[in-house]
Amino acid sequence: MGGEGAKIWASAAPLLALQVSDSVWSSTFQDMTGIEIVDDILTVSVPSQLVRQRIEQRYVELLLSALTDAGYPDLTLVIEVEIDTLQPEPESAESQNGSVSNEAAAVTAGSSTGAAPQANAARRYTFDTFVIGQSNRFAHAAALSVAETPARSYNPLFVYGDAGLGKTHLLQSIANYVRENYPQYKVRYLSTETLLNEFVDAIRKNSQPEFKRRYREIDVLLVDDIQFMEGKEQLQEEFFHTFNTLHEAQRQIVLSSDRPPDAIATLEDRLRSRFKMGLITDIQPPDFETRLAILLKKGEQSNTKVPADVLEFIATNITYNIRELEGALIRVSAYAALNNEQLTVELAEIILADSISATKPRQITASYISEKTAEMFGVEVEQLRSKSRTRDLVHARQVGMYVCRELTDLSYPQIGKEFGGRDHTTVIHAYDKISNLMQERRKTYDDVTLLIQQILAR
């Protein structure tokens, strides 16, 4: 039966690996193994108690989704902790501290096990896939310079701009470039939300020394959405000392934000001054030529064939950010695939009428989208935020997350918070899954289109 358990994990692991960052995969799931499956109970093992707790607290939803997608929706998962006599590699030792026990925890529905390929969604973010234009040329050049010579050019590098313009792409590109060209370097990319969660976890478990070592003994630290640090005094205090330690040791620091340091309210002055020590660069909304180039590259990457005049129509009318551009491309290509129709400008105008309308409301909140999602699918808002995983409710929740990402400027963590405090990786999984299903299932396409129309018609 152990072979069957390993087989189930081998099926689910690649799907899970596509939904989490490289650091999360290596520190949390890479060493998970399948033990056995008996009476629909799948037992897996992890190397430490801390890994088990992290999975229970943050990644159960993703595990269940991966298992469901792999064809195993009705399993109960038991996570065992085994004593691991091998010392973890430095880069995969993230959060490996803590006591080891033989305790086991049961999680309802879904599971994963075994060694899986290190496929990773973050690896799609490279400098080669970043489309350069007048709006982002300087930021791209600065990021590439930092990646080529860490801590020798701009330190820290601070990149700011509105949501959906490519800041995360640049930070992930730096991380991937350094990992490839400086394999001896310890590189860590994470969001400020993840940093906060780990900091709070360290305080709760009285493991601050391990937390300090984890972030002060690395060569390149990249922190996304640093603006979420405002108002969090203890985290700012800790990050101040981490910043000083890394900078004095000539280690590279890269930060991103939706605004420049001076505009981040309640940020300590001593931290603000350090953010301004290196280079500050911004990313502006893309111009027409850049928008068109982005659409062309996205079409090539997804093997989607859209006529040139339709791409020009989209680039002309969707001007706000890259996220909206990609959403428009998905919608028109999905419509054509589902209806077996030839795409024309006239048809694209009909499909995207709600998005390109001059009266399109910009102030759409996540709570309003939740309400309209619940109303359309005949459920309560609280059900969308609950832990229930019935098939219809999961579909409604994922559609709501997708639309929230399309119609608002909220980050993945902010959307996850609206839908029951879910981890940002759950939102990424939902967005990618609905994007794919729109190409394959007419019902999913119709659900998304109808929900968007109802929200924009208010």
Image (cartoon, helix red, strand yellow):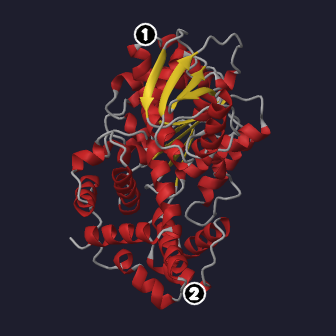
Task: Judge from the rendering whether residue 452 lies leftward or rightward of residue 253; answer left or right.
Answer: left
In the image, 2 versus 245, the foreground residue is 2
Task: Judge from the rendering whether residue 227 lies leftward or rightward of residue 89; answer left or right.
Answer: left
Query: Hey, what amino acid is under mark 1?
Result: Asn
Using the image, tell me which numbered label, if any, was put on residue 206.
Answer: 1
Q: Is residue 106 above or below residue 329?
A: above
Q: Is residue 345 above or below residue 216?
A: below
Residue 218 visible in the picture = no
At which x and y percent is residue 237? 41, 21
Using the image, tell me which numbered label, if any, was put on residue 125.
Answer: none
Residue in the picture at 42% in, 12% down: 205
Task: Judge from the rendering whether residue 353 lies leftward or rightward of residue 458; answer left or right.
Answer: right
Residue in the picture at 27% in, 60% down: 377
Residue at mark 2 to residue at mark 1: CA–CA distance = 60 Å
Residue in the picture at 66% in, 37% down: 7
In the image, 28 versus 410, the foreground residue is 28
Q: Quadrant of residue 147?
A: top right
Task: Judge from the rendering whether residue 435 lies leftward or rightward of residue 33; answer left or right.
Answer: left
Q: Is residue 191 above or below residue 102?
A: below
Tag 1 or tag 2, which sits nearer the N-term?
1
- Residue at which label 2 appears: 309
At which x and y percent is residue 297? 65, 68
SS label for mark 2: helix
SS label for mark 1: loop
Residue in the picture at 45% in, 74% down: 318
